[in-house]
Image: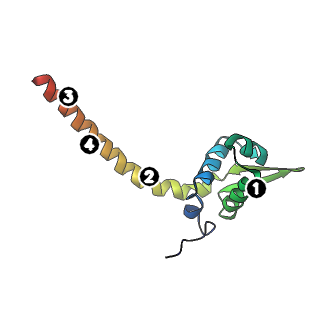
Amino acid sequence: MPRAAATSDIFNAVGEPRRRDILAFLAADERPVGAIVDSLNLAQPSVSKHLKVLRDVGLVHVRREGRQIFYRTNVQAIRPLHEWTSTFERYWQNQLTRVKTRAEAATDRRKEQ
C-alpha cells in the first residue's frame, strides 16, 4: 500500500522526525528560518521544505516582516495530535503503575526474607 503524502494531514506531516524537531523548537516562540537552521543544524533548503509541509497542513503560522519570514506553531492545529496521543498516555500511565507496584512488592518480599 502506498504511503500517504506528508501534506495529506497532520499525522503524516509529523511522521518525519525533523518536522517534529522544528515544531518543538517553534513551540517556545516565533522564529525566523535562519534561527531554525542554526539551532537544528539543518540545511536551509531542507528547513524550507519541512516548513512548507507544516504550513500546508496548518501546523505553523507564517508572518512576514520586511524580508524576514517568521514561523510559529499553530497550537489549535496540534490539538488533534494531543487528543489522539492522550489515549496512549493513559495506557502507559497504567503500565508504569503496574511496574511500580510489582517492583515495590518485590522489594517488600526481599525485606521480609
The three-letter amino acid code for the residue at tag 4 is: Arg
Which residue is labeled 3 in the image?
A: 107
* Percent of width and height locating residue 57: 65, 64
First in sequence: mark 3 or mark 2?
2
Residue under label 2, please give it: 86
Name the residue type under label 1. Answer: Pro
Residue 46, given in percent of the width and then of the height, sits at 71, 55
Q: Position of residue 6 (x, y in %)?
A: 61, 66
Disc 3 to disc 1, how far (Cα)?
54 Å
Tag 4 and tag 2, C-beta contact below 8 Å: no
Which label is found at residue 45?
1
Asked where in the image residue 19 lies, by quadrant, the reply is bottom right
As drawn, is 52 to the left or to the right of 7? right
Badge 3 marks a residue whose secondary structure is helix
Q: Earlier in the sequence, mark 4 or mark 2?
A: 2
Q: Which residue is mark 4?
A: 98
Contact between labelled residues 2 and 3, with CB atoms less than 8 Å apart: no
Earlier along the polypeptide chain: callout 3 or callout 1?
1
Foreground of the two, 19 or 96: 19
Question: Disc 2 vs disc 1: which is toward the camera?
Answer: 1
In the image, what residue occupies the spot 79% across and 52% down?
Answer: 63
Amino acid bearing label 3? Thr
> Which residue sits furthest right?
66
Q: CA distance from mark 1 to mark 4?
A: 46 Å
Q: Earlier in the sequence, mark 1 or mark 4?
A: 1
